[in-house]
Image (tube, grey):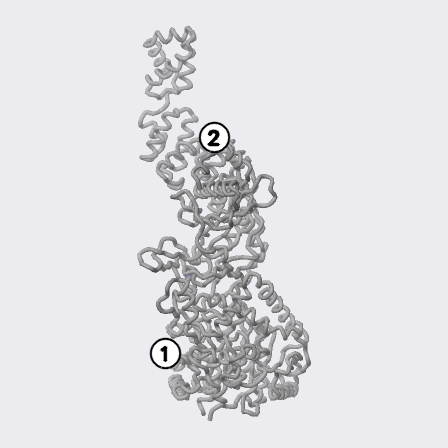
Amino acid sequence: MDLASITLKQAADLLRQRTVSAVELTQFFLDRIVTHNPELNAFITVDAEGALTAARQADARLAAGQGGPLTGIPLAVKDLFCTKGVRTTCASRMLANFTPPYESTVTRRLQEAGMVMLGKTNMDEFAMGSSNETSYFGPVRNPWDRSRTPGGSSGGSAAAVAAGLCVAALGTDTGGSIRQPASMTGITGLKPTYGRVSRFGMIAFASSLDQAGPMTRTVEDAALLLQAMAGHDPLDATSIDQPVEDYGSLLAQDKGPQERMRGLRIGIPQEYYTDGMAAAVRKSLEEAIRVFQDLGAVCQPVALPCTDYAIPTYYIIAPAEASSNLARYDGIRFGYRCEQPADLADMFARSRSEGFGAEVKRRIMLGTYVLSSGYYDAFYRKAQKVRRLIADDFQAAFTQVDLLLTPTAPETAFRIGEKNADPVKMYLSDIFTINVNLAGLPALSVPCGWDAQNLPIGLQLIGRPLQEGTLLSAGHAFQQVTAWHTRRAYE
Amino acid sequence: MSQKGLSTQSGAEGSARARYETVIGLEVHAQMLTRSKIFCGCSTRFGAEANTQICPICAAFPGVLPVLNREAVQMAIKTGLAIDGQVRLLSEFARKNYFYPDLPAGYQISQYELPIVEQGALWIDSPERGEGVRIGITRIHMEVDAGKSLHEGIYGASWVDLNRTGTPLMEIVSEPDLRSSGEAGEYLKKLRAIVRYLGVCDGNMEEGSFRCDANVSVRLHGDSVFGTRCELKNLNSIRNVMRAIDYEVERQIELLEEGGKVVQETRLWNADLNSSRPMRGKEDAHDYRYFPEPDLPPLRLTAERVAALREAMPELPDAKAARFGQQYQLSRYDAGVLTSSRELADYFEAVAAHAASLGHGNAKMAANWVTGELAARLNRDGVEIGQSPLQPWQLGKLVALIQQGTLSGKLAKEVFEIMCQEGGDPQQIAEQRGMRQVSDEGAIDVAIARVLASYPDDVAQYRAGKGKVMGFLVGQVMKATQGKANPALVNQRLLAKLAE
Ligand SMILES: [Zn+2]
């Protein structure tokens, strides 16, 4: 078996059967990282020593007949999850030398489940970007075409999964940062309901939108990972205190795809069919609709009238929160401090000017502006009202249908540098994903086709709050009858 | 400002002053006595070595999140109920954004548009306007304290101590209903008594756990709009609040009388110089960019939870004073003094109860001993009632001994002194030292006979109509009995003998 393209589920079986040890599996991926990372730049930090130690512990557990489906599985972690004792940079010069003295809840839970953290993946600086080009550590390259971006902001995690540098990865999604790169690299990515997964120890970009999720080769793998990630956390006041569905069993049930999909009502938001949608994307989506219909789902048009306001609303709320969240990087207690500050004001100003990149500074300024007295009502308060209306749109749609089906991104992976000159053009890359964050809903991206340039296309399924199970079940059914998710970017 | 302007109270300037009305609003920051900080589990212990009571949340490390301390919410609700406020079932935290080294997150978590308590009031006895003046309280909101910047011991730099960061505060904002420094003082005393009664704040202004800023303006009597106000800061005692207000009122009136204008500004009080100066920098020009705190969901309370806290409220100063007036027949003043702290009130009640249990229920006398002899002693030693050298039963028994005539007032004071220094039961002390008051008519008559025999001239003068001599003769009888004779009985028997 080709270990590079192994799914989490397959790897778990091999580990349990002792066909392969966790150390062997870990060493295999560490070797692949050494070979391929210089070109892809998917990892900022590789923790070979820590990974092998964890792998040995996993082997001991497995040998003792203990451990679960995640024990011994090599994982790549987006570099904004704080990892105790392992450098966590957020792809920023500001935190290039920051080593947290605490562990994020998500990574702690996965480590407790026996996962092996290979290293920390590249991303847009502070998760601000849609192409992974804003990283202080340089852009990530798309394994399908190295002149192109893997999308962002979780571009390093997406590229690592797509290039077979890990079995699965962690991403975070504020406006599409899991789903859009998943779509552009041909993998599966899930953004859970806001509050389903703890944000503790995840370096904040926009607190009311950020959510961690799995990036994997299959929907089944995403379900296994989410199972361990999800659940209430007393350290996060916004985490939801409700029991977690058993996603693993849900997908393990001996159910055919027809059984899963029969009678399920799928809404197709009409507002998403804009000129911005590439022809190949439209074609793949229409094919996907037919697949779901063939499985017995009922597809019908639905209206989300506020869709056009999603991008402007997002680019008020997210920068507003970011401008405040990023105020703590002042050069005093941790992170970058400028040389020879003349006085306090100079230290604040220069540490931040030198420590942050251009996109981060742009958003801090934007956020500061929309919160300023005299502008607050016109921008921030109004955006909050529109956000409410966007959520109401979804709620209304979900009275008619069980799921929404859309493309994940309007086009396939674009070239590095292509959209750098025009931030608004870049922001439009998240046009189909951003309103899901504004409404706090769960959404899943799975590959559904390739365009003429051999670049992957993704579809997005959007569910009701806390209905990750329905999403996963539908996504799994799609993967049971299609083979897009088995395509590999490497030989 | 000229010396003349401040000191002259007569003539034209005096009458000018009388034409102005003072308007004061107070903002009090009360540190809540929670065991842990408001958004993390760190201890709120005061006085620990710098930066030892902190965690990544206190220090606003990347990715950490605040979790609200229920105890702090509880305390804010209780305070709201104590001032007859409206407790909001839905309140909200907000971020107040500004850069400062001792504010690690770059924002303070506070409450802004939806505070936990609104529309309260408390009643004060105004030195000028009389009893029971209502002072409105606009709001109480919860917020987090900042750290401290220290500027000592290092040249050209500052230290930051984050121990205090995260300590829960209540900001209690009054309406501009106060009309004099005296009223401001009464308001603060009442508010401090309330938070102490509730056990939500230690009320210590010197240590900064109960801090006050004053907004002061003046206007001509009858004006419908307020004058321009100045905010006074660095007021670390009630006395300083009052002095700073008086100074500010004089300053503003003088400015206006000279044809000038009051500039809205923040002024820093200097107690040593007895004056204030404008704070440097454009403190009022801050744009704090408040917005709802996305890391904390809106705070929702149930009516049941508020009702349960209302049920469990202790008796508060006003109610207690009213009860003392009725139950113990105390004057409004005495009741006010005795209820100024819960500990003092409890002490007094224990004294009165012990005296009553011995069959002597004159609480007025118990009150006199607590507010008189005992208060003087505590004051002299600079201690609170909690460190009283006497247990309530000792003082209660002493009061009972006076009331039953066993001890004279003079003897009681001696016993009091002995108890303070050596402890013990007042009755045993009196008996062991033979300090029992003599109420035996026979013994007193013997002493009187001796005195009358020794001072025949004075007896003659008395009988000739010089009533004054009586005092001298009583004194001589008391002296002859080493002060132990019951003075009332001496008086009575002496009058009878002289009338013979
Ligand atoms: Zn702490």
Q: Nearer the viewer, residue A199 or A2?
A: A199
Above or below: residue B238 compared with residue A28: above
Q: Is residue B357 left or right of residue B443?
A: right
> What residue is disc 1 on?
A50
Mark 1 CB near ligand 1 (8 Å cut)? no
Crowding at mark 2 (Cα within 10 Å: few <14, some 14-19, many 20+): some
Disc 2 sits on a residue from what chain?
Answer: B
Q: Amino acid at mark 1?
A: Gly
Mark 1 and mark 2 in contact? Answer it, CB < 8 Å: no
Secondary structure found at label 2:
helix
Q: Is residue B291 left or right of residue B487?
A: right
Disc 1 sits on a residue from what chain?
Answer: A
Marks 1, 2: nearer the viewer: 1
Secondary structure found at label 1:
helix
Q: Amino acid at mark 2?
A: Lys
- Disc number placed over residue A245 in the picture, else none: none
Residue B33 drawn at (x, y percent): 44, 52
Q: Nearer the viewer, residue A416 or A233?
A: A416
Residue A412 drawn at (x, y percent): 55, 86
